[in-house]
Image: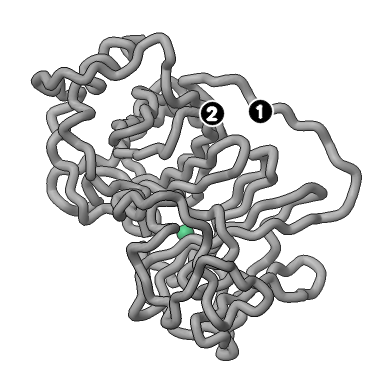
Amino acid sequence: MNTPTKLSGFALGLAAVFGTAYGVGHLTGPVTPAAETRHDATDAGHDSAETDHGDGGHAATATAHLPGGLLVSERGYTLQPVTAPAGEFAFRITGPDGRPVTRYDVAHDKRMHLIVARRDLSGFRHVHPELAADGTWRVASPLAGPGVWRAFADFTPTGAEPLTLGVDVTVPGALAHRPLPAPATSTTVDGYTVTLTGAPQPGGTSRLTLTVSRDGRPVTDLQPYLGAYGHLVALRQGDLAYLHVHPEGAPGDGRTPAGPAVTFAAEVPSAGTYRLYLDFRHGDAVHTAEFTVVAGDQAAPAPAAPAPTTAPTPDADHGSPGHGHS
Ligand SMILES: [Cu+2]
């Protein structure tokens, strides 16, 4: 493994990429002293003392620098689970006016991306609910068994900025202890082997390359899934801060191969342990490869001196901001 070599080369370039908004676009908002939430007038019951905003439309205020998914209510939008029949999961998003939102922009082929994982980071699923006329989203329940789950709604209300809200949902039953798998750079899923090159470093953009093989042979005919050859979600152990990253390049752009490697530029908000979930499509099925990674190597802090960037691949400079998160 030549990961350390690549990392040191990459670390030297970190200073130059500060401000790139991959995966966690809101991180680039002004970093203000951590004021607490700005609940709007419609958010009854939360009368934060320091807030005096009347219109709920402040895109660049306190929560602008938070990772996604930590809040159940943000910028006037609130994620509300709705009672549903057995086997179904339902929710709605209420807007600044307190009413269910019914108009959404399509992002990555869908108007709503619902991601779930247990609080212990097991059971990851990424599904796409259907919207009813009254603003209720419904989907066959992705909550596979007992536990405390985090459900993330990743969406863009028409006329507003993209948003990821999160809510805890408990499925009753006997709790199983599922320790987080140890950090690893290779994993298997559905007969595929996926290897990870690169490691996330807090404070900048980190290139993570995932390479897919099957039976010892590189997979070179990955199928586009939601407009990309892969979707990467990262959840931070401890609070399940959420990052959704799309790869460099796009199917059909004339320069992006259909595997075996898919490269992402990820910005992790802090040192810590993360679980990565790579969704990719092959053989007309979507597969999810999972990795535990540790961001921030205390033994090798990023040097501050600028230096030429060592490009891990020929495409290193093609970090188009157009591929930010959905
Ligand atoms: Cu999705």
* Residue 2 percent location from the top left of the image: 31, 10
Count of labels shown?
Answer: 2
Q: What residue do we see at 46% from left, 24% from top? A: 215
Left/right of residue 281 with respect to residue 176 in the rendered view: left
- Circle 1 is placed at which residue position? 180
Q: What residue do we see at 40% from left, 49% from top? A: 33
User: In the image, is residue 297 above or below residue 206?
Assistant: above
- Examine the rendering and report whether any part of residue 320 can be seen: yes
User: The residue tagged with tag 1: helix, strand or loop?
Assistant: loop
Q: Are marks 1 and 2 in contact (CB under 8 Å)?
A: yes
Tag 2: residue type?
Thr
In this rendered view, identify the residue nearer to me: 281 or 26: 26
Separation of residues labelled 1 and 2 (CA atoms): 10 Å
State the mark number for residue 16.
none
Q: Quadrant of residue 119?
A: top right
Left/right of residue 183 with respect to residue 231 in the rendered view: right
* Residue 210 percent location from the top left of the image: 37, 31
Tag 1: residue type?
Leu
Q: Residues within 10 Å of mark 1 (few under 14, many from 20)?
A: some
Q: What residue do we see at 36% from left, 23% from top? A: 197
* Residue 159 percent location from the top left of the image: 33, 80
User: In the image, is residue 88 above or below residue 199?
Assistant: below
User: The residue tagged with tag 2: helix, strand or loop?
Assistant: strand
Q: Is the shortest distance between ligand 1 and the CB of mark 2 under 8 Å?
A: no
In this rendered view, identify the residue nearer to me: 160 or 66: 66
Please state, as top left, top right, bottom left or bottom right, where the C terminus lies in the image.
bottom left
- Examine the rendering and report whether any part of residue 281 can be seen: no
User: In the image, is residue 290 above or below residue 300?
Assistant: below
- Circle 2 is placed at which residue position? 273
* Residue 137 percent location from the top left of the image: 60, 76
